[in-house]
Image (cartoon, helix red, strand yellow):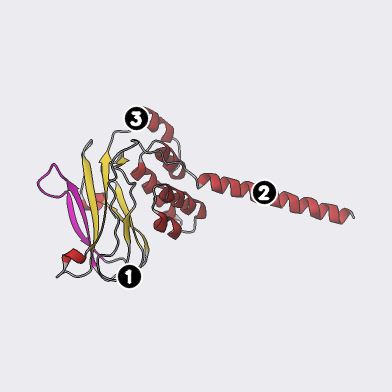
């Protein structure tokens, strides 16, 4: 009888511990992105196929449907591709106030489906504060028929971080800083920080859930399901 009681208590304690851990994981995985502007015009463009068949890959930029914010001079840009592709890939960053694009770069085709990244620091591209940039990811399916390109795009604007935000993130790790930036409506910093956590440990399920929740909140369901 006493053995049964002890076993029951042990199981209860273990279950409670697992539940508590699950709660902590869920909490870490559920940042709330609060867009900085309500009612702003939609600016994200999806990357479906254009007359190249149902088997064509789908491309989406990891951007909200409005102009996303960053505090960084040289942020990373992320996009999702639904399947491996052999097509040439181009990334373009455009400031409509300038004569030439800030970036026109051909990249290697993704060897696997999933989330891809480009660091602007790798190409010495610096965003000017207060300027809205549009960035495009293009899969060039047929160089002779550029109308068949699979294109996705979004917009980004650099802002100065408030003293309040700076104070909040000063002593936090990347995971918790991502949560703060999401709550403050600074999309690109939130995505970059939590992606850095995932890059450091691809098996970090809590971090992947955190990123998946962020993506789902702005309607990027396909990329969210991948995480």
> Closer to the camera: disc 3 or disc 1?
1
Q: Which residue is mark 3?
A: 162
Q: Residue sitting at 84 percent across and 52 percent down?
A: 5
Q: Which residues are magenta?
A: 88-108
Give yes or no for contact between labels 3 and 1 (Cβ–Cβ under 8 Å).
no
Q: How far apart, in angstroms, are the residues tagged by discs 3 and 1? A: 46 Å
Q: Residue furthest top?
A: 163
Q: Position of residue 123 (x, y in %)?
A: 21, 52
How many numbered badges does the structure rendering display? 3
Q: Nearer the viewer, residue 125 or 181?
A: 181
In the rendered structure, which disc, 2 or 3, sits on the residue that comes first in sequence? 2
- Quadrant assignment for the C terminus: bottom left
Residue at the spot of label 1? 54
As for residue 93 lying within the magenta part, the answer is yes
- Which of the two discs, 2 and 1, labels the residue nearer the N terminus? 2
> Which of these two is toward me, 78 or 56?
56
Splitting the image into 4 quarters, where does residue 112 fall? Answer: bottom left
Disc 2 designates what residue? 17
């Amino acid at each position: 009888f006493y053995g049964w009681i002890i076993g029951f208590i042990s199981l209860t304690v273990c279950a409670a511990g697992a539940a508590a851990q699950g709660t902590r994981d869920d909490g870490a995985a559920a940042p709330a992105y609060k867009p900085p502007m309500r009612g702003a015009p939609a600016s994200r463009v999806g990357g479906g196929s254009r007359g190249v068949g149902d088997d064509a890959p789908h491309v989406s930029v990891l951007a909200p449907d409005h102009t996303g914010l960053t505090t960084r001079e040289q942020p990373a840009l992320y996009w999702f591709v639904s399947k491996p592709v052999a097509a040439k890939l181009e990334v373009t960053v455009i400031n409509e106030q300038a004569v030439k694009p800030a970036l026109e770069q051909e990249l290697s085709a993704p060897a696997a489906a999933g989330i891809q990244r480009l660091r602007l620091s790798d190409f010495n591209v610096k965003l000017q504060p207060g300027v809205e940039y549009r960035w495009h990811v293009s899969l060039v399916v047929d160089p002779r028929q550029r109308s068949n390109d699979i294109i996705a795009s979004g917009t980004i604007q650099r802002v100065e971080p408030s003293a309040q935000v700076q104070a909040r993130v000063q002593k936090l790790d990347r995971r918790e800083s991502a949560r703060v930036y999401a709550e403050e409506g600074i999309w690109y910093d939130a995505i970059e920080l939590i992606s850095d956590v995932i890059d450091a440990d691809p098996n970090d399920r809590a971090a992947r859930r955190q990123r998946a929740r962020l993506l789902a909140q702005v309607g990027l369901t396909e990329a969210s399901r991948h995480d």
